[in-house]
Image (cartoon, rainbow, N blue to C red):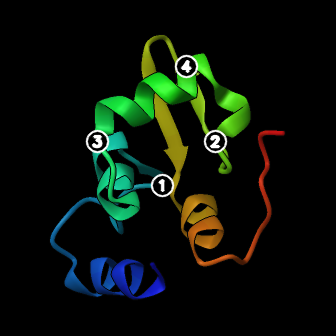
Amino acid sequence: MIVIVDKALESGSGDIMNNQIISPREAAELLDCDYWTLIETCKQRPEVVHFNFTFVGNRLKIPKEAFLKWLRGEIPNTNV
């Protein structure tokens, strides 16, 4: 997974590096899962999601820096 993250960061093709929040679609792409499944899992089973997130209304917000550090294994689960 680290290789995928590094390639995504180097490409500069999305909003990953331009915002402090990573979108559910971007996170799902890096996790190789469906974005709707990611959103529903965060809503219904937050205890199984091992990275920091929050909902603002019905919108899933994932802090970019924390997510990427978690994806690289640099920080532990922050939602438990």
Measured Cα–Cα span from mark 1 to mark 4: 21 Å
SS under mark 4: helix
Q: Is residue 2 left or right of residue 52?
A: left
Residue kind at label 1, given as amino acid type: Gln
Tell me, yes or no, whether the two marked residues, 1 and 2, touch with CB atoms within 8 Å: no
Residue at the limit of the structure toward the top, as seen here: 57
Question: What residue is disc 4 on?
Answer: 43
Give the mark nearest the N terminus, 1 or 4.
Answer: 1
What residue is drawn where x is 55% and y is 19%? 43
The quarter holding residue 72 reads bottom right
Question: Residue 68, image x and y in percent?
Answer: 54, 68
Measured Cα–Cα span from mark 4 to mark 2: 10 Å
Q: Is residue 23 left or right of residue 2?
A: left
Question: Residue 45, image x and y in percent?
Answer: 63, 24
Give the mark nearest the N terminus, 2 or 3.
Answer: 3
What residue is drawn where x is 68% and y is 49%? 50
SS under mark 3: loop
Question: What residue is disc 1 on?
Answer: 20
Question: Residue 46, image x and y in percent?
Answer: 66, 29
Residue depth check, mark 1 versus mark 2: number of the one nearer the observer: 2
Residue kind at label 4, given as amino acid type: Lys
Question: What residue is disc 3 on?
Answer: 34
SS under mark 1: loop
Tell me, yes or no, whether the two marked residues, 1 and 3, touch with CB atoms within 8 Å: no
Residue kind at label 3, given as amino acid type: Asp
Residue depth check, mark 4 versus mark 3: number of the one nearer the observer: 3
The quarter holding residue 39 reads top left
Q: Is residue 50 above or below residue 47?
A: below
* Label 1 packing within 10 angstroms: few (<14), some (14-19), many (20+): some
Question: What residue is disc 2 on?
Answer: 49
